[in-house]
Image (cartoon, rainbow, N blue to C red):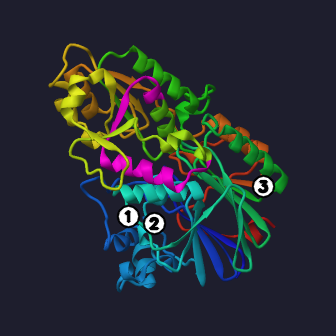
Amino acid sequence: MRPTITFFSGLNTIGGTHVLIGCGEDAILFDYGARPSAHYDWLNPAVHMELPRGLRQHLLTRKAPPVFGLYDPDYLGDLSYEDVIQNAWDGMQFPRYKRVSAFVSHIHQDHMELLPFLGEQVDLYMHRDSVSVYDGVVASGEWYGTKANVIGLADGEERQIGEQLHIQLRETDHDIAGASALLVTAGGHKILYTGDWRTHGRHRDYVERLFADMAAQHLDMIITETTQLKEETLWQKQLPQKELELPGLYREMLQGAQGLCYLNILCRNVERVADFIKVTKECGRTLVLDRATALLWHTAATEGLSHLEGDPVLEETGAIRLFEGEDPSGLPYETVSLREIVHHKKDYVFYLIYPKTPIMAELERTGEQGVPSHYFHADGNPLFAGDKILHAWLDDFGVRYHFHGTFGHAIPREITRMMKLASPKLVAPLHGNHPELLDTGEIPKLLPTFGQTFDLDKLFS
């Protein structure tokens, strides 16, 4: 079969990107998360799709790609490919392959939510740090595991898939460990999928090197995310707050606080968690975790993270405690009681994830009084500063709020700069609400429709 590329979704939404590149008998699908369709917000925590019937529901609402070679037959049941094509995709025809592999650029829900539905016949590629983070997410109970054959790759590592597909993983920078781009060669055509990326993170050098290297590859296409692209940001010049500024801001808050401190950061960003464990200890405080957060961190850290290799923080157990009532089995941390915390508030930082916000009532209205608490919020859920529920709790107890979101995505100017640096023949912007606004200079843009397939030989003839 001739080399083709099919764009199923994620074309004008933030997340849910599903792109299939195939040649001969083999194909690779990336990414593998889920997002509501472009015009409907159908799901929330009360209305959701779960195992085992969830795969059928995702397929019939076009939130999972109609690539049946990916899926566990047990979850498909008697649902046929023809059912999905005729009833969900209005009879559209797509390339079909004997073998289909998958790639996940990083372990954020909008890029990996559908992993539990993959079958054991599927080779699933991701950065080896992403494997550790995913295993931590599964161990914590936050998400389900996968039956797929998970293959962790290092930066720059390559794989041949069948006779006519070749891939290379390239590490980038995002607000999570293991974020990577994928260079796919199909029938002689070279296509780079960026995943999510930014130029204000701790590994900016990876991003600069990636796009400089791609200029020498003479790429046919770059498929890039455009999350931050909207009319009001088109001429933004200043980069968002840099990742490496956060530990200093956190330290500043701790040094100025006399009472209890709260911390809300996304635990999947394990390198940031490592920084905050260190600062917490250096400031003479102990970090208190719930079991799920502790399991995620401990599992990812002990399995191995390339940028934390040999870091003493991996052996640090004395600076961490589990909150009372949390099961300590399988974890190297002692527990601490509510009574101990509320009578020695200046000695603790409470890692308070959003669903457990009501614990604040016990922590604020018992024990030591009269000294305000502080809440440090940096990209933990809720992702933005204005959540009404969170602020209702903070305001009621007089807790002082410190918001320091860094955002995981490049500003439009930086996307334009990198596209011009890499200089492909074509740019396909997606993973954003307004990809059509991307300035690519003289490089043509491809704005595919849902389910559109392109013959790569014809596209680049």
Q: Which mark is residue 425?
A: 3
Between 108 and 347, the residue placed more toward the observer is 347
Classed neighbour count for the residue bearing mark 1: other residues with Cα under 10 Å, few (<14), some (14–19), many (≥20): some
CA gap between label 2 and label 1 equals: 8 Å
Q: Are the residues tagged 2 and 1 within 8 Å (C-beta)?
A: yes
Q: Amino acid at mark 1?
A: Tyr
Determine the residue positioned at 55% across, 26% down. Answer: 245
**Is 311 positioned to the left or the right of 78 in the image?**
right
Q: Which residue is mark 1?
A: 144
Residue 428 % position (x, y): 65, 54
On screen, residue 309 above or below 5: above
Q: Does any portion of residue 242 appear in the rendered image?
A: no
Q: Nearer the viewer, mark 1 or mark 3?
A: 1
- Quadrant showing the C terminus: bottom right
Determine the residue positioned at 41% across, 83% down. Answer: 73
Determine the residue positioned at 29% across, 50% down. Answer: 328
Read off the magenta span: 279-306
Q: Which mark is residue 115?
A: 2
Q: Main secondary structure of the magenta part?
A: helix
